[in-house]
Image: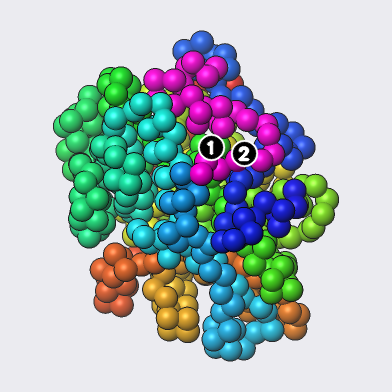
Amino acid sequence: MDTVKYILSDDRIPRVWYNIQADLPKPLPPVMHPGTGQPIGPDDLAPLFPMALIMQEVSQERIIEIPEEVLNIYQQWRPSPLFRARRLEKVLDTPARIYYKYEGVSPCGSHKPNTAVAQAYYNKQEGVKRLSTETGAGQWGSALSMAAAFLGLECKVFMVRVSYDQKPYRRGMMEAYGASVTPSPSNETESGKAILAQNPDSTGSLGIAISEAVEVAAKDPNTKYCLGSVLNHVLLHQTVVGQEAIEQFAMADDYPDIIIGCTGGGSNFSGLVFPFVGRNLRGETETRVIAVEPTACPSLTKGPYAYDFGDTAHLTPLVKMHTLGSTFVPAGIHAGGLRYHGMAPLVSHLLQLGAIEAVAYNQLETFAAGVQFARAEGILPAPEANHAIAAALKEALRCKKEGVSRAILFNLSGHGHFDVQAYLDYHAGKLVDYEYPEEEIAMALAGLPSVGA
């Protein structure tokens, strides 16, 4: 795909989404019905999603046109800037050329509106009145709340309890947009009540919050469920990021040798790298692509590639992905957006194909990287983005050691203005590293479904 061809001439915003499924050498394993053990069809997903998104989920078309109304909203912050981190290069004394795509310029401060606006649009087109969703750190909940406000929809958000307590300003932002925000697990759903009955002090997880949001949507014909990561159509919508980056590198007369993104469910990573990976898969380029995750929730680096549920209460279909087990509850690290037990099937599949690499970093090292970046470049990163920064620093120092100049690109997926307490805790020595809790994960993996095994 010639990315430049698909850029609007007046505002340089991509007018299509790129679907990497068209370029995969081997197709994704099918999504399975947990009851029948057979691949699911579009009708099985209809209670949760509008048909337009279901069709995008299974599409094999390389490009999908972006609706005009969505483009009009994108214009408020897209294209996002691509910066050369020259001050950081000087601090590191590295010959590397460090670039970052900054998604913190969106109204709610992250990459999440790229898909939130699209999902809200398609739901509105189908006559849906209310959206339900989960959120970890709050970036996704903020984005969907904003998109719902733009398009005149109600929004119900289940926010993971540990983040609900750690990040009250994110909650306040969602409520300012008009959303209803509930800490998860809650007593508002049967799945939430079941978790609280087992553990009244549960800090929650994205898997639990997903169960609650899915349950709400499944029981109300006027409500549909929206997911901020993992699913194919979500990753599809984010590819405006990578398409813009390719165009911007052409303007700079450069091209990345290494591309890095943090990974929780896979959306910001995929949005940046998929257009580049597509070029690799088509034999046009040979760029290294690195996914970075926390050591406390290392689905790609430690989790087996297996069929599993996307939620804790097992209300969702089965997808094949790198997983730590659907009942696994990660430690309460500040990178709340990376606390998900599984990885997007497309990202997992690319790792299996050898098209990407995966590494894991601990919490203290990532915060140290974020502070170093902030002091050099002036932007305080979100804790999630700090993982990408830590990997970029390592690669830049490797360039210094080897005496070679490589172009390194990473996605600064959001700012950390609502995460200042985490930085205060870091400087006060209150943060600790969480290692891979093998016993807990072994228990969760023991419950993997046999379907598709």
**In the foreground, 331 or 5:** 5
Give the percent coordinates (x, y) of residue 311. 39, 32
Residue pushed farthest top? Answer: 36
Answer whether residue 435 is magenta in the image: no
Inter-mark Cα distance, 2 to 1: 11 Å
Name the mark nearer the viewer: 2 or 1. Answer: 2
What count of labels does the image hold?
2
Question: In this rendering, does residue 426 appear at all?
Answer: yes
Residue interval drawn in magenta: 40-68
Task: Reply yes or no: does residue 59 show up in magenta.
Answer: yes
Name the spot of residue 59 as percent of width and height, x first.
63, 30
Q: Residues within 10 Å of mark 1 (few under 14, many from 20)?
A: many
Q: Residue at x 60, y 45 (%)?
A: 17
The disc label shown at residue 64, or none: 2
- Of callouts 2 and 1, the N-terminal one: 2
Can see residue 448?
no
The image quadrant where one finds the C terminus is: top right
Disc 1 marks which residue?
233
Q: Left or right: 12 with respect to 208?
A: right
Lateral position of residue 63 relative to residue 181, left or right: right
* Residue at x 56%, y 74% (from the top left corner): 83
In the image, residue 45 sits, relative to residue 188, either above or below, namely: above
> Helix or strand or loop: what does disc 1 sit on?
helix
| Residue under the point 75% across and 48% down | 1
Where does the image place residue 301, in percent across and percent down from the top left?
57, 50
Q: Amino acid at mark 2?
A: Ile
Residue type at mark 1: give it.
Answer: His
Looking at the picture, tell me which residue is in the foreground, 434 or 357.
Answer: 357
The residue sitting at 55% across, 66% down in the picture is 101
